[in-house]
Amino acid sequence: MIDMKKNKRVLVVFIGLILVFGLALGVGYLHETKNSKKNEDTKLEETKNEKPNEEEKEEPKEEESKPEEKKEEQVILDIDVDIEKVIADYDLEIIRSSIMEDSEYFKWIADAIIKNDKIAPKYKRYVFLQYKTIMANKKFLNKEIFLISVKELSIKDADGVTVGNALGIYQDYETAITIGKSMPDDVLMHELMHFVDYRIGGGNLDVVYFTGDKYSLDGPGETLKLPYGKLIIEGGAETNMARYNNYMATVSSYNHLAYIYNLLALMFGEQEMNDIYYSRDGNARLFLEMNKYGITYEEYCKFMDDLDYMSTEANFVGIVTKREAEYYLEALEFVSNLYNKKYGHSWADDPTFSNVMRFAIQGDYEGRELIPKSGFNEKEKALLNVRIDTNVFQKQVDKGYTSSYYSYTYYYLNGKHYISIPYYLNKNYEHLYEFVFEYDMVNNAVISKNVLMK
Ligand SMILES: [Zn+2]
């Protein structure tokens, strides 16, 4: 019999290692590519620019200009993508409105995806689907850099089930995604979220500027390094994967980071957290947002470091050691303190926030109990200790589904609260499904459910 717990761990939690140690190199590489392929990659602008020039030639010398015109036509033909055919070929009806939002740019992206033989054909559709995310975040889009990135992207299968110790990996320094054998779709979707995060605007900047009494995104002042920020990178990837691909993916890994990311979304707003994820200077934006309520640079770094260290220590397996539990609790205490500073009263008076905090404490892996300590007041501790009523969910699950243990993943989308729980369809633990419940956080009731096959 399969060790379902271990299997489940591997399946759900190892998703999405990201390697960015070559980020600076990656950006350099991008520039190099841009220059070395100038003719090819700047076609978009050149074509646009050449058209008026062509028209300005009022007295063309018939015989001489003909070959030039032919050449020009050829360039245009090269990029003349039949959008309807692409939508049909790649089953993209679901993102039609995003495609039509900027159909000219879509043609360039489509051409790049179709011609990119480093992307295995079975994966091309998933790259196309990112166009929805790109359009939704076009204020952060650098069209040229992203187009080059799509041309450079490679997606291939790993030799084995895992890539190192991950199910999938995105390596920014070589614009490469590698997927373990027979992985569910959301592993690739997760890695593509990293690709878009890093390449939509051309890399992430993890610095903030300080003049001695004021912090800013752009300076002047001393440059202060910010922590790596798995909270944003992984918590954001999982949450935004659900946001932009909710027809096929949900939050199913990095649960602890998703909890904290979404607790912050409850405080700062979904759009703000979305912008923190997609902008190049999101790490600094998040710090500045917290600094408004008195969080210092040192406190911010400790909070982010705890979460960075925790998931490294956890080796992507979740909270399994006492030490990780302490780091996670410290991070939740930080969030609690931040809420109380921002609103001037305890979150214990906010039924929605209280309930999400309760899920964040109780809903994690392996049924490990996290015991809230000194960082919370008595009323807060009492609320956190009220047990989650699992029957509310169990009653909604059809016969035949079993779960080796419960993990309640939380995310907040479009003002609605979702709890996602994995189940297997049969006792052989072969077919994994994710039950996604829209949840009434005030009345503790299931509003609706959706079942996703993994
Ligand atoms: Zn990841």
Image (cartoon, rainbow, N blue to C red):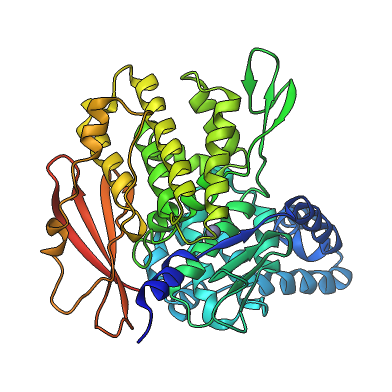
Question: Residue 294 versus residue 288: which sits nearer the camera?
Answer: 294
Quarter of image, ligand 1: bottom right
In this rendering, the answer to whether 386 lies above or below 114 is: above
Please report the residue visible at 65 percent of the width from the left and 35 percent of the height from the top: 226
Q: Position of residue 130 (x, y in %)?
A: 50, 62
Q: Is residue 111 visible?
A: yes
Question: Residue 115 versus residue 445: which sits nearer the camera?
Answer: 445
Image quarter (top left, top right, bottom left or bottom right) of the C terminus: bottom left
In screen coordinates, is 293 left or right of 153? Answer: left
In this rendering, the answer to whether 204 lies above or below 391 is: above
In this rendering, the answer to whether 116 lies above or below 262 is: below
Residue 148 figure quarter: bottom right
Question: Residue 405 versus residue 56: which sits nearer the camera?
Answer: 405
Callout count: 0
Please report the residue visible at 87 percent of the width from the left and 73 percent of the height from the top: 63
Residue 34 figure quarter: bottom right
